[in-house]
Image (tube, rainbow, N blue to C red):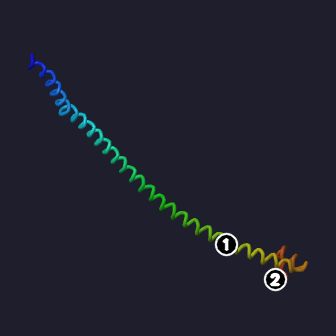
Amino acid sequence: MKYYKWILPLVIVIGVVITFFLVLPEEESVIDQIQKIEIEELKRENIVLKENNDLLDKEIAEMELMTDSLIALVIKDQQVIEKLIVRKNEKVSAIDDFTDDELYQYFTRFSTKGTTD
């Protein structure tokens, strides 16, 4: 009987040791495989995001060129508008100094030269 008392605890200890050495490493290897798969998926997503980022950078560069050219056109238009305003103000101030006869001739495009022929 004395020998039988130690057999049951010995079987339990052997079972626990087998569990530690066989079952747990398999679970860890499954976890490692899942983590490797997740890492590969994240790498693929990272590559896709880098490509999208490069495309967006190119679009930003093109849009910056467009805005620069549009700003140059706006500045040119503003200069033309300023010149037209100055020319209009010069004509208005010149018309203010006209006499009645000169105003009549200006607005009717009446000219005494060359009409007598």
Residue 114 image label: 2
Return the x and y of residue 4 as percentages of the image width and height: 10, 18
Residue occupying the point 70% across, 73% down: 82
- Quadrant where the N terminus is found in the figure: top left
29 is higher (above) or lower (below) than 116: above
- Residue 15: x and y in percent read 17, 26
- The disc labelled 1 sits on which kind of residue? Val
Report the quarter where the C terminus lies: bottom right
- For numbered disc 2, what is the local secondary structure? loop
Would you identify the image quadrant in which residue 33 lies?
top left
Figure label count: 2
Question: Relative to residue 51, is residue 14 drawn left or right?
Answer: left
Earlier-in-chain disc, 2 versus 1: 1
- Is 88 or 75 nearer to us in this picture? 75
Identify whether 14 is placed above or below 91. above
Toward the viewer: 72 or 12? 12
